[in-house]
Image (tube, rainbow, N blue to C red):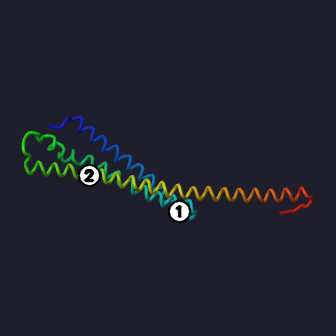
Amino acid sequence: MMPAAELYAAWALGLAILSVAVVFGYRQIRTGLKSAATDEAVMLRTSAHRRIVVSILLATCGLLVIVPYATNVAGDIARIAPDHKPTDAEMAATRAYAWCWIAIATLLFVALVVIAWDMLIVRRYWARSLSRLHDDRRAMIARQLSRHRAEKNGYHSDE
């Protein structure tokens, strides 16, 4: 028999992951639906799409944490005695349980890759934006400096 604490912990973990994924996904859907034509809005929208993918992957992980306990596969695994040869049904339950956790690990890895990819793209975008801002500021300061020098030398311009 499986301990009740393990059952409750698995359900709590699965539901927590699922609810975080749903809330995060909902927020990203709202961000992705905004339709502005600026470069920043396009970048935010495509980033929201990638984050929706992460939300779907996390929601699937949450469901996969719950499934072995909801279908009692984890209970079947807990009842297998370590000192006897497992039957075919016990081996099938063990394989199903193992594949479930392999799928969870794979989905989490894919989610981490998408998150890293998103962070890289967002960082590159903001680095380009910051560089553009620095260039604009340098140009503005150069114009002001040349205007100031011209006024100081007696030449007055109305530009």
Q: Which structural element holds mark 2?
A: helix
Marker disc for residue 98: none
Give the percent coordinates (x, y) of residue 122.
Answer: 51, 56
Q: Is residue 123 left or right of residue 52?
A: right
Q: Residue furthest bottom?
A: 37
Circle 2 residue: 102
Give the percent coordinates (x, y) of residue 159.
Answer: 83, 63
Q: Residue furthest right?
A: 154
Q: Quadrant of the N terminus?
A: top left
Look at discs 1 and 2 and give the one toward the viewer. Answer: 2
Between disc 1 and disc 2, whose residue precedes? 1
Q: Is residue 96 left or right of residue 149?
A: left
Under mark 1, the amino acid is Val
| Residue ID at (91%, 61%) | 155
Give the percent coordinates (x, y) of residue 138.
Answer: 72, 57
Q: Which structural element holds mark 1?
A: helix
Under mark 2, the amino acid is Ile
Taking 136 as reference, is 82 above or below it?
above
Marker disc for residue 42: 1
| Residue ID at (16%, 48%) | 94
State the residue in front, 5 or 130.
130
